[in-house]
Amino acid sequence: MSLNQRWKMPGTLLVVVAILVVTPGAWSQTKYQTLHRFQERYGRSKDGLGPVAGLTFDRAGNLYGTTESGGAHSNGTVFELTPNSSGGWTESVLYSFCSLTKCQDGEQIFTGVIFDQAGNLYGTTTHGGIHDWGTVFQLSPNSNGGWTEKVLYNFCSLSKCSDGSQPESGLIFDQAGNLYGTTASGGEGSGNDEGTVFELEPNANGSWTESVLHSFNGPDGLNPQASLILDAAGNLYGTTPYGGTGGGGTAGGGTIFELMPASGGWTESVLYDFCSAENCADGLEPAASLIFDQTGNLYGTTVEGGAACNCGVVFQLTLGQGGSWMEKVLHAFTGGDGSYPSGSLVFDSTGNLFGTAHEGGNLTACPTGGCGVVFKLVPESKGAWHEAVLHDFMAHPGALPAAGMIFDSAGNLYGTTNGYNSPFNGSVFEITP
């Protein structure tokens, strides 16, 4: 089952415009503001419902994001938020998916979008396309202010979906303009359903050629759902929430992997198998993308595991002198300080880490288990890290953040919440740490 299915929870949602939060362990000056609410009316929402992905800035300071569902055809949207003269933000839908017959333009989007140098947006849809197994798409701005969508690739175009199917990750560019991503299913593994890492290369005639760089097979990982990252040498790094040789059930506890370009192809190495510690104290199910620090260490989150309550961890991977990678848990969530982090992390300029936990916080909310938190991790002496809750969502009006956040130039953080049922099904928020 896809981790994205966790985001569906019944309940009610209370509404406020903005709130100043001071929770135990929080910084007293933290300010939270809702920029936009995705609202359902009569069972539909033309501006989208349920954002589960992060945001992207353009050069002018406008925000771009996606919703899993809603829109003109109830199959997801790409939206823009523009600051207005009154101090608020104005939302506009750039594209509603399933605009074509049988959703050949794509449907259901779990990922964010990225820009190229020309101002075009790129992303993936998990379903839709010619074969209904997902697409890679491009949105290009028009001279009249609109946007035109073009499908660059339809997955499952090859026999037994050996080219991959159901992409749930976002995309990244390399310096040559090639796109990289993952599919949660398909590939040439033993069951033809373990997932892939793929590359899309642009051709002179405007078409794109897809190549599978790696098909997962179980011990090296299963069903990747997160975006990749590149290092300076052109190596790719990513996570799989399942598979590996650790514990955590028959499918394994998940992996961190590296793909290195080699003569005629790519070589995959598993850097770490999760649930290798007793009771999965090292973490279980890494579902988010990774980030580097300035010295080359990797950081990420796991949805479950940890020594406290199986509520997830923040971890660090450090390359040892012998070439192996060593994992260290920086924080194990306990529920009240957050639980089940599913988004990626982000550093500020001083080396502090920020992220979201999908649940936890006030455990009486949503209705029990918490509506999620924004957290901060501060490095201390002797390698320890201190965690503090910057915002406890409490369904006011945001709830259940599923993605990581981004900074603006002033040090403010921006993110999304998936929402906690009608009439408000998600939000875009700003927080000043």
Image (tube, rainbow, N blue to C red):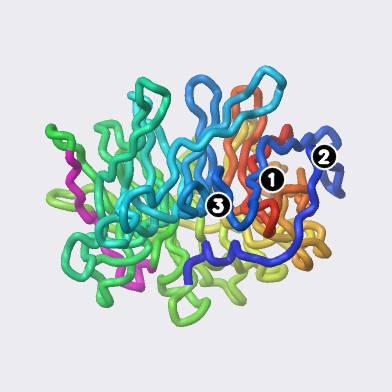
* Residue furthest out toward the top: 85
Mark 3 or 2, nearer chain start: 2
Magenta residues (range): 207-222
- Please state which amino acid type lies under the numbered disc 3: Val
Q: Is residue 110 visible?
A: no
Q: Position of residue 65 (x, y in %)?
A: 51, 40
| Sooner in the amino-acid sequence: mark 1 or mark 2 | 2
Q: Observer-nearest residue: 117 or 196?
A: 117
Instruction: Report whether 246 appears left or right of 372.
Output: left
Q: Which residue is identified by label 1?
A: 377
102 sits left or right of 335 in the view: left
Quadrant assignment for the C terminus:
top right
Give the side of residue 147 with respect to residue 427, left or right.
Answer: left
Dot 1, crowdedness within 10 Å: few (<14), some or many (≥20)? many
Residue appearing at x 17%, y 52% in the figure = 265
Residue 11 appears in the rendering: yes
The type of residue carrying mark 1 is Leu
Name the residue beneath numbered marker 3: 52
Asked whether 157 or 26 is in front, the reply is 157
Q: What's the residue at 77%, 57% (across, down)?
A: 361
The amino acid type of the residue labelled 2 equals Ile
Asked if residue 196 lies left or right of residue 249, the reply is left
